[in-house]
């Protein structure tokens, strides 16, 4: 690591020696009307170019001289000025929003050009503007469901917000909200995500080639940034839809200096349950809510503080008998400091919590089950815009995890359930990283970096030795604060791009990712009670290696874009439950229920996108294979992972009919998941049971669905605007198999039959949104 | 900013969340036939029964013919072997063999030259203190459910299985319980049945009988994994064959357990 740093620094210094005297233009890019900083704005001074960072900051170094200085961003008017550069200058830019109501509609690119020169691969960026017209289930705009329409990203199931990236499992996605890890990003058992799109500024997905500042999950990074809050004027916006209502309030605390934002959402389907005559519905509870809040404060020109938080909860109850609630809470305190026009620093202190609680009140068995994962996290990052050819990022990240795997408490004195508290598990995760983007020649760009991670398992606690059958053979007890084991893993990150000509480029990358927190789930759908487990002496860190190559082409004045990426990924130390494992086992040795193995995934992803004009959208296609080999499952042979789908197609289009109307449609097709079906049946206990041979040897039927949407702008004034959104999910009413189960025939008990369950056949919805 | 009062309204078009279920054709490959052994030895005379059958292909009928002409025996840890004669095709019984707590019993089955074996020790008998039917609120509905109370002895490892009969008809659900969370306590198990199956509902005047078995942890695991993975219901865990205690490659189980039965008439 040290050697590498030295070599790199030597390289940089000698390159600087060659360059003529240069000056730096730096500053922050914002939206004029709201004061929101703009992420990823394109900044150009002559031929040199850069992008603003996550906090709107940019820095560009060019030789002295006259330049046309240009700043552009999605949905903004281009800012152009000429400058004569003879010293370092600060230029804070405020961009004007594009007027929406032009007589002859000319819609500019809805997303910025995929940078051909940047070596970054496998990246997709979405702004909330881009997702607003996409029709969705229950009309609830959802970033996670939009992300699933991209190539290489697959939905975990019908209407589910869980997703699989390039053969990875649902727990292999690092989901960040203002840098804080969100451990369970779904509401209502997966039908909604925890992200209220009204509070979100920017969503970036890395399905490969993650930069070195990210780590901890094998397959992807979903980096979600909340809005900062308008520091110019007060704003209220909201919406009311089929199942939820939301409200967003923002405004300046001190104009230009500080602002606040509060966004809330709550579903009210349960209020309708109360009106029902059916007592089995009326006595049930089923709702969730989200609250996002943010404060930010500019201290002078060089410092800015942000405090942001998220709190969400789901509550589910069946009368008084059974209750389940779960939720995430995150908090992030950040300090931006501009050391110089070339050195930007961010320090973050982050808190993250996920817990669930089950309460059972039945007869003599009254008890509660509680489980929690809690992180305290310190991050420091520097971005050093060394010169026009090199851009360095380095920093560290230190996280302390506390996991409470399960705590059972009797809730009445007569309960037959004993108090049982599984041992808390403590761990400390550290990462040191460095990455440089180097403009080697006009055509070749390189990003190289290293993330060095350590994961220490801390006492106190008992750790085990386990035999092949899963029985504990030895127990070692450790005292509080003792370092029980430390896993150290270097994670190299390399990417290169070669620009073939003005409009096309090829890129290649390699990344290694290491994961030390594992979600063990044995159910076919994600459940809030799935267990997060940290690496132990037996559970080894999971490791993935991803190789990818891509071709990128911009067509017809950048109005169209063609992307082709292919990848090969290997995964080590994958975890699965043993057959007959008990998820709620009352033992600290969870390892007795587990098996270990490996995985591999490969595929080709193709996307064709139209970015400008009345008709925008994309067509994506993925051809892929995902397999697992777990010692003790399927006779130790490779088998298809559940999320293995050969073909995956998504067509997303949006058409602006008139000033007031926009219509849209999605069509989705994929090969059914791999699934285990019976190989035979037998009789035990006076009943028919099923006999299985090959794991995941069958496939669910192919899935396809068309969704339609329309947005009708009712009013568009400076002070008040409102719109109605209509959507129809599954417009041609395809009965897609959600599950297939096997049973004795109801009509003819002498036979067995397969029964398909389908959800959401035609699902219309309407929502009303306003802003003033 | 002009704060204005606005009236929010919601438009709700019919909520067609209704899910739909239909029978479909799935073409399933045939598999090699496997033997299925259900072996039981209890503390009651006449309770020693071993049933032998085979797996069938999915599209065949549900008549599972027994396997005759097998040699079936149970040997205790003192070396006393009882050969079980075939009483009807595929059913092998001993009218006299009973199991004693603490003793280990080994089942031996040989069918057409293939042999299978399984061992199980007889668990301690825990008595059923009471059986009663009580109204419970279950997913918002009030239903009558059977409850069994017993006093779990100290020390983990006690496992139980309950079989419910309503007016002589056996309930299909598998009711099992261990003492992982309730070791050493006076314990009550409520025999929950799915509320949508109306025909199973307990009504006033019904005769409810519950058999209580004290089973071994290995057999508990068998019933647990059978219920989780082999019922054909695709909603929960990955489908898989249950964890058996039979060696030699057969499906099924060998359970040595105590039996106690109580009956109540629902008030």
Image (cartoon, coloured by chain):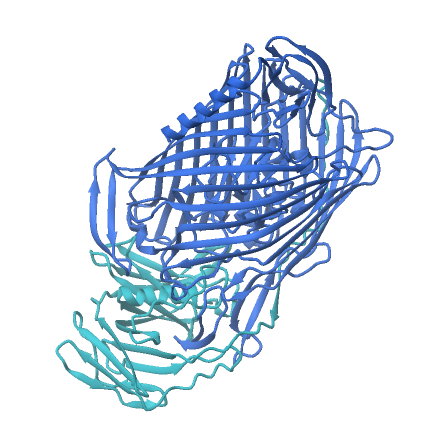
Chain colours: A blue, B cyan
Residue ID at (68%, 28%): A237
In the image, residue A596 above or below residue A46: below
Using the rendered image of the protein, determine whether residue A343 is visible from the camera's viewpoint: no
In the image, residue B70 above or below residue A495: below
Residue ID at (21%, 37%): A479
Quarter of the image where the N terminus of chain A is located: top left
Residue ID at (24%, 66%): B127
In the image, residue B108 above or below residue A639: below
Residue A772 shown left or right of residue B183 in the figure: right
Point out residue A377 in the picture as x, y percentages from the top left corner: 41, 29
**Nearer to the camera, A669 or B212:** A669
Using the rendered image of the protein, determine whether residue B82 is visible from the camera's viewpoint: yes
Point out residue A176 in the picture as x, y percentages from the top left corner: 51, 35
Point out residue B116 in the picture as x, y percentages from the top left corner: 29, 79
**Nearer to the camera, A395 or A198:** A395
User: How many numbered dots are placed on residues in this image?
Assistant: 0
Farthest residue, direction right: A103
Farthest residue, direction left: B78
In the image, residue B185 above or below residue A266: below
Rendering quarter of residue A33: top right
Residue A354 shown left or right of residue B74 in the figure: right
Quarter of the image where the C terminus of chain A is located: top right
**Nearer to the camera, B261 or B113:** B113
Residue A494 shown left or right of residue B15 in the figure: left
Point out residue A411 in the picture as x, y percentages from the top left corner: 35, 45
Residue A434 shown left or right of residue B94 in the figure: right
Rendering quarter of residue A24: top right
Farthest residue, direction front: A18
């Amino acid at each position: 690591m040290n050697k590498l740093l030295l070599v790199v620094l030597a390289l940089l210094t000698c390159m600087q020696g060659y360059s003529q005297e240069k000056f730096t233009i730096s500053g922050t890019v914002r939206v004029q009307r709201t004061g929101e900083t703009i992420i990823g704005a394109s900044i150009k001074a002559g031929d040199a170019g850069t992008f603003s960072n996550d906090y709107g900051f940019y820095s560009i170094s060019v030789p002295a001289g006259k330049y046309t200085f240009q700043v552009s961003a999605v949905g903004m008017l281009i800012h152009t000025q000429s400058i004569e550069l003879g010293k370092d200058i600060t230029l804070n830019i405020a961009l004007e929003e594009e007027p929406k109501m032009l007589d002859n509609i000319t819609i500019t690119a809805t997303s910025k050009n995929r940078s051909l020169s940047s070596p970054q691969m496998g990246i997709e960026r979405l702004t909330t503007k881009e997702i607003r017209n996409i029709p969705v289930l229950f009309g609830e705009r959802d970033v996670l469901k939009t992300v699933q329409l991209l190539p290489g990203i697959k939905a975990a199931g019908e209407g589910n917000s869980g997703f699989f990236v390039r053969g990875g499992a649902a727990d292999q996605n690092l989901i960040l909200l203002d840098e804080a890890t969100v451990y369970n990003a779904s509401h209502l058992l997966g039908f909604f995500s925890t992200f209220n799109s009204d509070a979100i500024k920017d969503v970036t997905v890395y399905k490969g080639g993650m930069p070195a500042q990210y780590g901890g999950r094998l397959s992807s990074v979903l980096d979600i940034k909340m809005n900062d809050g308008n520091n110019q004027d007060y704003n209220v916006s909201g919406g009311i839809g089929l199942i939820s209502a939301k409200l967003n309030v923002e405004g300046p605390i001190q104009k230009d200096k500080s602002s606040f934002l509060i966004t809330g959402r709550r579903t009210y389907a349960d209020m309708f349950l109360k009106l029902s005559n059916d007592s089995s519905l009326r006595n049930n509870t089923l709702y969730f809510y989200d609250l996002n809040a943010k404060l930010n404060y500019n201290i002078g020109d060089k410092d800015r503080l942000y405090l942001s938080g998220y709190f969400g909860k789901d509550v589910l109850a069946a009368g008084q008998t059974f209750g389940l609630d779960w939720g995430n809470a995150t908090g992030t305190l950040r300090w931006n400091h501009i050391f110089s026009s070339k050195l930007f620093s961010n320090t973050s202190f982050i808190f993250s919590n996920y817990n669930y609680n089950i309460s059972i009140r039945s007869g003599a068995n009254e008890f509660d089950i509680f489980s929690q994962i809690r992180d305290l996290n310190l991050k420091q990052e520097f971005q050093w815009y060394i010169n026009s050819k090199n851009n360095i990022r380095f920093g560290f990240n230190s996280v302390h995890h506390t996991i409470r795997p399960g705590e059972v408490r009797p809730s009445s004195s007569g309960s037959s359930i004993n108090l049982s508290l599984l041992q808390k598990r403590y761990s400390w995760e550290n990462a040191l990283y460095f990455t440089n983007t180097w403009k080697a020649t006009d055509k070749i760009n390189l990003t190289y970096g290293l993330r060095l991670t350590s994961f220490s398992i801390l006492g106190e606690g008992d750790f085990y030795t386990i035999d092949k059958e899963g029985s504990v053979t030895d127990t070692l007890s450790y005292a509080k604060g003792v370092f029980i084991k430390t896993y150290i893993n270097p994670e190299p990150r390399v990417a290169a791009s070669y620009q073939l000509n003005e409009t096309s480029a090829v890129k290649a990358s390699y990344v290694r990712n290491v994961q030390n927190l594992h979600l063990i789930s044995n159910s076919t759908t994600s459940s809030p009670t799935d267990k997060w487990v940290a690496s132990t002496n037996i559970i080894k860190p999971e490791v993935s290696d991803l190789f990818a190559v891509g071709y990128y082409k911009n067509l017809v004045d950048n109005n169209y874009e063609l992307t082709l990426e292919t990848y090969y990924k290997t995964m080590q130390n994958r975890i699965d439950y043993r057959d007959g494992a008990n998820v709620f086992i009352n033992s600290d040795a969870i390892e007795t229920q587990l098996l270990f193995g490996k995985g591999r995934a490969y595929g080709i992803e193709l996307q064709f996108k139209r970015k400008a004009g009345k008709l925008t959208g994309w067509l994506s296609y993925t051809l892929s294979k995902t397999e697992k080999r777990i010692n003790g499952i399927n006779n130790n042979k490779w088998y298809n992972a559940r999320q293995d789908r050969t073909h995956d197609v998504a067509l997303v289009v949006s058409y602006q009919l008139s000033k007031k109307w926009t219509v849209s449609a999605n069509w989705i097709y994929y090969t059914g998941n791999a699934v285990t079906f019976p190989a035979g049946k037998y009789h035990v206990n006076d009943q028919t049971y099923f006999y299985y041979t090959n794991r995941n040897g069958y496939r669910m039927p192919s899935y396809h669905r068309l969704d339609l949407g329309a947005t009708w702008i009712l009013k568009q004034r400076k002070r008040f605007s409102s719109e109605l959104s209509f959507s129809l999910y599954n417009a041609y009413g395809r009965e897609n198999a959600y599950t297939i189960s096997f049973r004795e025939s109801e009509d003819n008990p002498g036979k067995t039959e397969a029964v398909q369950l389908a959800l959401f056949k035609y699902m219309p919805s309407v929502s009303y949104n306003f802003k003033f | 900013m002009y704060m204005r009062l606005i009236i929010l309204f919601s438009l709700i078009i019919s909520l067609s969340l209704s899910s739909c279920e239909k029978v479909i054709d799935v073409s399933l490959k045939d598999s090699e036939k496997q033997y299925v052994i259900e072996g039981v030895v209890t503390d009651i005379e006449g309770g020693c029964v071993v049933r032998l059958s085979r797996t069938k292909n999915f599209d065949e009928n549900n008549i599972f013919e027994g396997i005759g002409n097998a040699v079936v025996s149970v040997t205790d840890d003192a070396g006393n072997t009882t050969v079980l004669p075939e009483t009807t095709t595929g059913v092998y019984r001993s009218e006299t063999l009973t199991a004693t707590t603490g003793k280990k019993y080994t089942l031996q089955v040989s069918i057409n030259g293939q042999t299978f074996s399984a061992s199980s020790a007889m668990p301690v008998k825990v008595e059923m203190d009471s059986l009663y039917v009580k109204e419970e609120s279950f997913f918002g509905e009030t239903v009558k459910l059977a409850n069994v109370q017993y006093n779990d002895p100290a020390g983990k490892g006690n496992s139980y299985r309950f079989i419910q009969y309503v007016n002589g008809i056996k309930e299909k659900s598998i009711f099992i319980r261990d003492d992982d969370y309730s070791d050493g306590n006076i314990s009550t198990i409520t025999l929950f049945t799915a509320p949508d199956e109306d025909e199973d509902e307990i009504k006033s005047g019904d005769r409810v009988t519950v058999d209580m078995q004290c089973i071994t942890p290995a057999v508990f695991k068998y019933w647990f994994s059978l219920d989780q993975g082999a019922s054909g219901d695709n909603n929960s865990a990955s489908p898989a064959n249950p964890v058996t205690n039979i060696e030699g490659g057969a499906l099924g189980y060998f359970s040595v357990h105590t039996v106690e039965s109580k009956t109540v008439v629902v008030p």
